[in-house]
Image (tube, rainbow, N blue to C red):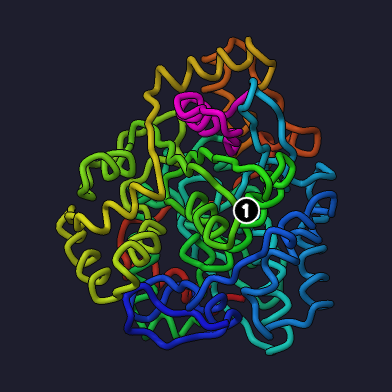
Amino acid sequence: MKYISTRGNAPVLSFEEAMLTGLARDGGLYVPETIPTMSADEIAALAGVSYEEAAFRVMRPFVGDAFTDDEFKGIIARAYEGFRHEARAPLVQLAPNHFLLELFHGPTLAFKDFAMQLIGQLFQFSLGRRNDRVTIVGATSGDTGSAAIEAFRGLDNVDVFILFPHGRVSDIQRKQMTTPDDANVHALALDGDFDDCQAKLKDMFNDFDFRDGVKLAGVNSINWARVLAQVVYYFTSAVSLGAPYREVSFTVPTGNFGDIFAGYIAKKMGLPIKDLVIATNQNDILHRTMESGAYTKEGVTPSISPSMDIQVSSNFERALFDAYGRDGNAVAQLMEELKDGSFPISQGAMEILRETFKSGRASEDETMATIRDEFTACGEVLCPHSAVGVKVGNENLSGTPMITLATAHPAKFPDAVEQAMGRRPDLPPHMADMMDREEHVTRVPNDLAYLEALIKERIAQR
C-alpha cells in the first residue's frame, strides 16, 4: 500500500512513512494510492465482533507490511483499553430511524480519542524499533489537543507542542491541555483563532530546515492515520443497523472535514452509505461551498460549538483531489488561490461533490433549541457540536436509518448545555477535580519565528 500527495509533487511513501511524515513536502495531504474494498460477506462478518477486531479487519489492508498481524492487533488493543464503554462506540436511539453514535467514551471525552489513542500507540511502536525521536506539533480548536496530549504524554521519544487559540476553547478543553505536568508536554495559547494556529503549523512543515532539524511530525487530521482510525466506527455502527443488507446514512458535525471524509472512505470501501450529510454551525463555510460552488472565507465568529469555528477545512483538500480526478496540479492551484481567500470549484468537480455529500447548518439559537428539545424528548444530553449534527440530521431523515455522530461529552461544554436546558452536566468521576488542577501553559504571539525558537529551546532543555 502506497501513499501519494494531493498536490502531486511529493515522494510516494509507505503507510509508516506517511504516518510519521504527516504533511507532504509539497504542502499536500497523503492519501492511499488505491482504496481497498471489503466484500458484502466481509462486512457482514463484522457483526458481533469486538470493536478492536473490527478495527483490525477494516484498517489492516491500509497498513501494508508496516506491522505483523500480531503487532497491529497489540497496538489496537492498547489504544482502546482506556475507553470507558465496552462497545467503545455505542449507538443510542433518539427517535424512529434516527440514532446517535456516542464517540465520547475515550480518555478525553471526544471522538478524537479514537484516532489519537491509536496514533499514539503507532508512533510509540514505530519510534521504539527505530530508536528514533520526533517533535509533534499540533493545532487544535479544542479536542485534538487534549487527545494528543493524553496519547503522547510521558513518552521518552516524543515532545508534544499543542497550539490552541487563546480564549477560544471551553474551560474544560483548556484544562485538559494545560494541567498535565509531564516534561514532554507543552501547551501554547496563541493570540489568534484556530485558523491562525493551523496556518502556523503548516508554515512549520513548509520550513524544511526547521522541520528536519527538530524531526517534526504532525498528528492533526492532516495525518492519514487519523482519518483511517475514524473509518472504523462507520462500519461498526452501520453493521449494528443491518449493513451490508441495509443502507444507512450519516450526519457528521464537522469543521475540518476529517470525520466526514472518513465516512467517504468507508463508502469507497464498500459500506452501503446512502447519504453523507455535512453539519456546520454558524461558521458554515462547508455548507456555503456546497450551495454556491465556491470556497470563500468570511472570517470566524466565536460560537458555543468552538471546535467547529473554522474557515480553512484542511481535509476538504482530500475530497477535492478525488473530485478533480486526482489531479494534483489542479488541487495545488486551488490551494494557491485560497491564499487570497477564495477559489471557485469547477462544474464537474462540484457535481461529484454534490453527488457524494449533502449539507446543512445550525444557528446558535437552533443549536440551543436542539439541546433542550432532545433532552425533553428522550433524555439524551447533547454537547453543542452534537446538537448541530442532530438538528441537521433531523432535516435529512428518510426511510433509511440516520446515524448522527455525537462528537463530545456534554460536560466539556457545561455553560452552553446549562444555558440550553437549565441543568449543568457533570464531569465523569475520574475528571471531577479537573477545574482545581494547576495549569501549565505558555501564551505565545502569532509569530512563526518566535514559535520555532521556543520549540527548539524547549527541546534542548529535555
Would you say residue 135 sits in the magenta stretch? no
Task: Name the residue nearer the viewer: 442 or 41.
Answer: 41
Q: Is residue 400 magenta?
A: yes
Q: Residue at x 48, y 55 (%)?
A: 261
Q: Quadrant of the N terminus?
A: bottom right
In this picture, residue 260 sits left or right of residue 225 = left
Residue 69 falls left or right of residue 305: right
Give residue 5's position: percent from left, percent from top: 40, 77
Rendered residue at 60%/43% (across/down): 247
* Residue at the (63%, 67%) spot, across then down: 184
- Magenta part of the protein: which range? 381-406
| Vertical placement of residue 188 versus 423, above or below | below
Side of 445 relative to 455 (left or right): left
Q: Which residue is mark 1?
A: 147
User: Residue 30, relative to residue 320: is it above or below?
Assistant: below
Horizontal and vertical percent position of residue 358: 39, 40
Amino acid marked by disc 1: Ala
Q: Measured from the top left, where is residue 75 in percent x and y?
A: 77, 69
Q: Residues within 10 Å of mark 1 (few under 14, many from 20)?
A: many
Q: Quadrant of the C terminus?
A: bottom right
Q: Quadrant of residue 167?
A: top left
Q: Is residue 9 above or below residue 158?
A: below
